[in-house]
Amino acid sequence: MAAVTDEDNRKVQTAVLGGSDSRHPVFLPYEKESAERLRRMHGADGFSCGVLLGGCGKLLTLRACDDKKSHFAHRPPVRCTRTARDESSADHLYIGEALVRWLRRQGRPNITVEYVRQKHARSDSIEIRFGPKKKRRLLHVQMARRSFTEWEEDGRRLGATPGRPSTIRMYGPGSELAPYELQVAGYALRFRCETQNGTREVFVGTHLPGHKIEWTILERCRLHDQGLLTPALEPTSEGIRLKGAVKPERSAAEAPASSAEEAEEPAKGTTVTAHGQRQAAPTSGPDGPTHSGGDPRTRVGTSHKAAPDARRDRLASRAKAATEALPPIATDLAGCFTAAGFELSLIGGSLRDVLLGKSPQDVDLATDADPRQALRVVRGWADELGDSHVSSGVVEAYKGGEDDRHRVRINTRMPRTRSRVESASGGRRERGLEAYLMRSGFTVDAMALELWSTTLVDPSGGLDDLDRRVLRTPGRPADSISADPLLMMRAAGHAARFGFEPTSELVATMTAMAKRITAVPAERVQEEFSALMLAARPGDGLRLFVDTGLADHILPELPALRMESAEHHRHKDIYEHTLAVLEQAVSLETEGPDLTLRLAALFHDIGTPRTRRTGPGGRVSFHHHEVVGAKMSRRRMRALKYPAQLIEDVARLVELHLRFHGYSTQEWTDPAVRRYVRDAGPLLDRLHKLTRADCTTRNRGKAAALARAYDALEERIERLAAEGAREALRPDLNGYQIMEILGIRPGAELGRAYEYLRKLRMEEGPKDFEAARAALLAWRAHRSR
């Protein structure tokens, strides 16, 4: 982090409207036009760094930018210790505001809101009370991560038991507590926020068994005497239950269809493709857990009675929207292939990103042309050809200028989806493309958008999984992992990048087959692990990485941190502390994801298990764990084939990350501060961020004291740097003193002596007269030889 000085320009994306205690959040869109519209709407002095955001409460300046993201900036002088500054940092306020508006529309009186901050800088929980004075009810939203014991204690404190009308418990985006409620009540209520139209929209989810979540808007929910009802829930005499939870499923073989709509439903053990065709579902096998069979849509909450026509209409609507959102180069290239008589489809991660509302720079396509035919088409269209691999059937090309350059990868020899004659005459569609897609790793990647016909092909229910953030394989997880063990790393990466939740079947299979990751070359594992670390929420991916046992074979130092308690980490084990440090390091980044900083945060305490000692009175110590950790970091990163410079930078940060604590207990001399700066070298800014991120104490007074101490250290570093720059311009002896000592007159020799003393001061610091005189005489003696 930059030093906290009068020139501090710390960037934030969220603020509050009004004064420092305001509860009205605002999100600043990145685009200049939208940002300027927001400024015109609320004025130049309408935004504050609210205390409910963990901020300083002072006014913020809205900066609308062309060449970078628009942002809020603090006005000097700045003394703000706010760490969470990204678009999700005000989600607790958005959720609280949305619930208050919803309760008012429900006609509920006497609404009060409290943002409880027990552990975190922003909000530990939201407590909304409403209703008549003698019949007050509580709507409790848990925002922070809590342990199972803390969750139970909260239940006792709030008097919240499943089915009890007085309290409604819900869970925020990062609480990770919904599974506890699910085990007790059969379902759980969750929230998530998404950026839409320049604000953060709030969605309510019904967490169902099997890691399934049905999301809806708050307006579709209603308040009942027994609790909050979503479209997936209904009140019963035994309390709120899932709709149809007590009704057994009936397959088509057990009873005849009672209507034309039911007659269209496939028998159990078949699936319906995007085009209404039926195919056999995956079956069980000996290598690991399997899917339950039946329509894959049933695993993400879609009714068995979903009519094929309705599904086709939905696919057509999403296909149209995706086509309109495509980068122009994709439709332009599709026209070239169509003119040459070939098909072209958008596939894999590129289509997934488009369906998620993102515009990919790298575009993955598939064609029925062979490699040489594809090269002929691309050669006349591309600005530059890449490393095409004709033998493997992949053609690579680049299109666009420096600021808008797209890389295109075309997989060739894809089976044709249908012939032109059959298409024109309405003939039967072939299944080649669908079989090709079913070999993909996950259903969310097993879709294709036919650019020549604007058709979305979805043979495995990937669109439903994408909308519900569910991660699932098209067939049996064991088969997919056996074919590509690296798929397990990609699952962790998808969790970190997109917030996808793997099904219980996939998690169980990954756990059973984790050892197979050792068969994958280290370079490929490192590539996927780096992608995970650079994702928006690397902690989510790392938890899956550790919980499934993958880390035991790739990074065993990480799970070894579990249950290792430290004196300076008393409130949590070192594994949890490490993930918290990583999360805070991410929030301190100013120039995009920083792999060096994130790896240093991950590795900074890996030396603690090897240095743990128990002294008199049972006191635990970890002396020199930073030195041991630096050596362990080097060994592990070399095993993962990381570049040498990255390895040394990360190890150096790990070695230095505790150095500051000596300053916080006893202020250093100026030479000690200079040594700190010299030892950090070009890593000083990252060391600042890592040291600040390493403060995860619950004690707010201690945290504030550490922040003030580091603020003071950064200010001294800047002051000494400015003084050193000025003093380094002149030597310790002036021209008259040099001439007198050497017995010379003005001339070239005086200039050479003066320059020598100036460089000596820059390298070794200032000297007294006698030391400078001795150095000057030694210099002349050396020249005289």
Image (cartoon, grey):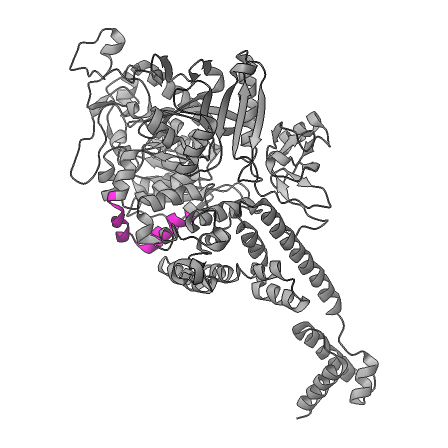
Q: Main secondary structure of the magenta part?
A: helix
Asked if one can make out residue 352 in the rendered structure from this viewpoint, the answer is: yes
Question: Is residue 471 found inside the magenta-colored segment of the image?
Answer: no
Asked if one can make out residue 199 in the rendered structure from this viewpoint, the answer is: no
Foreground pick, 568 / 260: 568
Asked if residue 760 is positioned above or below residue 17 in the image, the reply reads below
Q: Residue 133 occupies which quadrant of the picture?
A: top right
Give the residue displayed 48% in from the left and 34% down from the top: 359
List x then y, in percent, for residue 4.
67, 50
Q: Is residue 745 left or right of residue 113?
A: right
Question: Is residue 530 found inside the magenta-colored segment of the image?
Answer: yes
Q: Which residues are magenta?
A: 512-531
Foreground pick, 392 / 528: 528
List x then y, in percent, for residue 406.
47, 41
Give the residue displayed 62% in from the left and 28% down from the top: 23
Q: Residue 481 occupies which quadrant of the picture?
A: top left
List x then y, in percent, for residue 6.
73, 49
Foreground pick, 631 / 21: 21
Give the residue displayed 15% in from the left and 39% down from the top: 286
List x then y, in percent, for residue 119.
53, 40
Residue projecting furthest to the front: 617
- Image quarter of the C terminus: bottom right
Q: Is residue 121 left or right of residue 258?
A: right
Asked if residue 294 is positioned above or below residue 753 in the image, the reply reads above
Asked if residue 739 is positioned above or below residue 376 in the image, the reply reads below
Foreground pick, 142 / 317: 142
